[in-house]
Amino acid sequence: MAKRVVLAYSGGLDTSVIVRWLTERGYEVITYTADVGQGEELEEIPKKARQSGAVEAIVEDLKEEFARDYCLPVLRALALYEGKYPLSASLSRPLISKKLVYYAEKFKADYVAHGSTGKGNDQVRFELSVWALNPAIEVLAPVRSWEFKAREEQIEYAKKHGIPVKVEKEKPYSIDRNLWGISVECGPLEDPWTEPPKDAYQITFSAEEAPDEPDILTVGFEKGIPVSLNGRKYNLLSQLIMELNTLAGKHGVGRIDIVENRLVGIKSREVYEAPAATVLYEAYRDLLSLVTDRFTFHYFINHIPHEYAKLVYEGLWFSPLREALDAFTATLAESVTGEVRLKLFKGSVSVIGRRSDKSLYLEDLATYSEKDTFDHKAGELFTKVWGLPLKIKGLLKKKKQEFRT
């Protein structure tokens, strides 16, 4: 009886070769392709998978599930890996892994497989996610062990076995795209001193090409969920994100150039495009600050974004800690209802207004006009008490100096 495996399948050269390579080794291969907003036509995927040797090919639209269950929690945590990367590629891996496990159980497969290399982060994300969901399933990673040393060898193998491959000049970049963002690496980007070439960017304009007039954008939130752009309501979060990618990308918003620390211990130069994520992070942070008390907001901003980003980046999505942090951020999100007005211009996004029925801002207390109701005498007394430890320290220091003299 053939060994059955469910393969995460993109339709590219690597995963197409993996199908045949596994088949030759006695595996019955079922391919799984997730549409997470990569912007590609996926109708031809099943045919191509079967031509490569798959016995079954599954293509599934996961855009809304990805937006609601993965992008939204990361937004609510304001998670940025190393303060910059909004985790676009990292986020899709646990969702795809969940589906691999589901179909492995459905089709009684003992194995799942992925096309990650031995020095990438994705091998960790796929394998930890699968083990967390079903530790009895074995994970295969052919690229880490097969005989091919160069891409040309894979192309020759594909031609020999009738695997459809596009024979055209290959772009020098490795590109991973979903609705939350695009990651670009390899080619000229491997020199961290080199400015990213124009063709490295997929959905954002340069500042030079962006419009000479800014756009004013209003983002509406209901209980921490983005629901409207410029007053237009969206029933699907995924549609709002894709529309915002276009609006903000036109102004060059969301370009990120970073040398980041990979899990395997190497530094990697990455270029990201995340127009929608960049705008939503700015808007959410500002509105959260407006509706959250100082003690809670300071705790959140000092502890949650960094820790949450590490969990996602390091493949720990299916961990109790991530679930606990989600419970915390979901509680805060209950108050994040209102609108944020932003200006998009020449690669920048800036908040220029915000309002909410749950706002903790009181103009009568904040104003310096005749409407001021703040008790200034209380402020004087508060300052004396607040500064008392420093005053005592200063007094003792002065006495010691006098004693020495």
Image: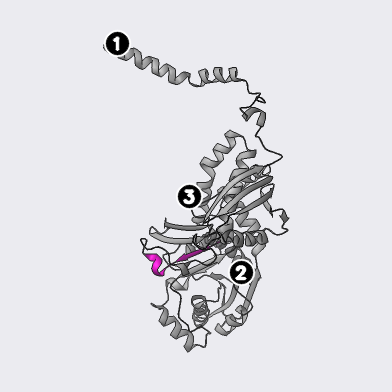
Which amino acid lies under the numbered mark 2 shown in the image of this protein? Ala
Q: Which residue is mark 1?
A: 403
Q: Position of residue 322 (x, y in %)?
A: 57, 50
* Mark 2 burial class by Cα count in 10 Å: few <14, some 14-19, many 20+: many
Q: Which residues are magenta?
A: 180-190
The residue tagged 3 is 83
User: Which residue was labeled with disc 2?
Assistant: 34
> Which residue is at the front of the view, 365 or 261?
365
Q: Which quadrant of the structure image shows residue 267?
A: bottom left
Task: State yes or no: discs 2 and 1 in contact (Cβ < 8 Å).
Answer: no
The amino acid type, in three-letter code, at marker 1 is Phe
Q: Would you say 138 lies left or right of 105 here?
A: left
> Where is 359 relative to 369, above or below?
below
Q: Amino acid at mark 3?
A: Gly
Q: Earlier in the sequence, mark 2 or mark 1?
A: 2
At label 1, counting other C-alpha atoms closer than 10 Å, the crowd grade (few under 14, some 14-19, many 20 or more) is few
